[in-house]
Every structure is written in C-alpha cells, then in structure tokens.
Image (tube, rainbow, N blue to C red):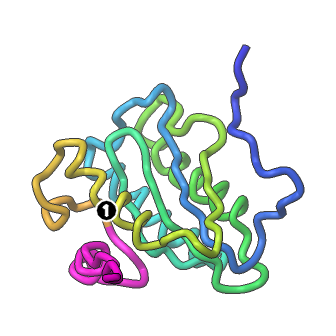
Amino acid sequence: MGRKRPPRIRGFDYLGLHAYFLTICTQDRYRAFEDRVHAECVCTQILQSAGDYRFEIIAYVVMPDHAHALAEGTRDDANFVGFVSMLKQRSAYDYSRVCPRRLWQEGFFDHVLREEESKIGIASYIIHNPVRAGLCTSVLDYPFVGSQRYTIRELIDAVQIRPRRSRP
C-alpha cells in the first residue's frame, strides 16, 4: 500500500521566512472547481489563511481539480503547515455545506525554495497553468489566478523577463 501523505522534509520545521511552492489536489482529482462559487471560495481562503499565518502569496491559481500557490513567510513565526491546514479546513467546511463529498485529498505537496531558485520561474509556471491546460488562451482570461504582491499585469510582465546572456 502506498503512502497517503506526501512526506515532509525531515528535521525542517516549516516556520519562518521561507518561500514554498504548494500544490493541493481534490479528492480523486474530482473537478470541484469547475463551479465558480467553489473556485472563488478557495481563492478567498488562500489569501485569508495566508494572512492569518503570516504569509504573502506571490502567485496562485485554482484549477478544476487542484490549486497551486507560491507563498513566502513574512515573519519568523510564519507557519506553513498551519497555513495549509487552515486553508484546507476552511475551504472544505464551506464546500461541505453544499456538497456531500470530501473536497481535498489527504496531505499536500510542497517544495521549499532554496536561495538560488527563481520565484519568477515558479510564478510563471503557476499563472500559466490554465493556458497550458487549455482552459483559456490568456492568463488575463482566467478568473482564478492572482497575487497579493502583484497585479495580474505585473505578474505577467515579471514572468516574461528573461535574463540576458553575457557575450564573450
């Protein structure tokens, strides 16, 4: 029998001024967020729970069967596991009031960014997810993408910047 929960990093406390790439999936990859009301609820809970647990959301997207976020701790007491747990709990509660099925699969997937990793690259992956999935032709056309730090236009402009190659 396989693991139910993705493993956390052994010895890492998930507290403080770190950045994380988060993925949470619906139970059985059910397309719960094709319903606009449910998708908007998750967007709201991403932002509210992030603030409550001392995170700023650099970029997020809610897809039909999963959500991604790039979250960065803003204080030494920023609690990533607490943030994700509360996000899932609040959104699942709202969902359960109208739908009889379980919303989220157990656990979540995270990647703790190292200093040398590009937040812009991950933000680009996140905001372009609906375009790659064929849900829209432009990020501007997708209603469930956003940021606490940037406008959508600023995000699009930022992720299109390519580093210059030095010439010999």
Q: What element carries label 1?
A: helix
Task: From the image, give the main secondary structure of the stretch colored magenta.
Answer: loop
- Residue labelled with disc 1: 127
What amino acid is found at the position of numbered circle 1 in the picture? Ile
- In the picture, measured across the screen, residue 75 lies left or right of residue 162, that is right
| Residue 137 point in image, percent of width and height | 10, 54
Q: Check disc 1: other Cα within 10 Å, few if <14, some if 14-19, many if 20+.
A: many
- In the picture, measured across the screen, residue 139 lies left or right of residue 6, that is left
| Residue pictured at 48% horizontal, 25% vertical | 28
Per the rendered image, the range of residues in magenta is: 146-168
| Residue pictured at 48% horizontal, 37% vertical | 26
| Residue 49 point in image, percent of width and height | 57, 68
| Residue 3 point in image, percent of width and height | 72, 26
| Depicted 122 relative to depicted 168: above or below | above
Q: Is residue 166 magenta?
A: yes
Relative to the observer, which residue lies in front, 99 or 64? Answer: 64
| Depicted 112 relative to depicted 148: above or below | above
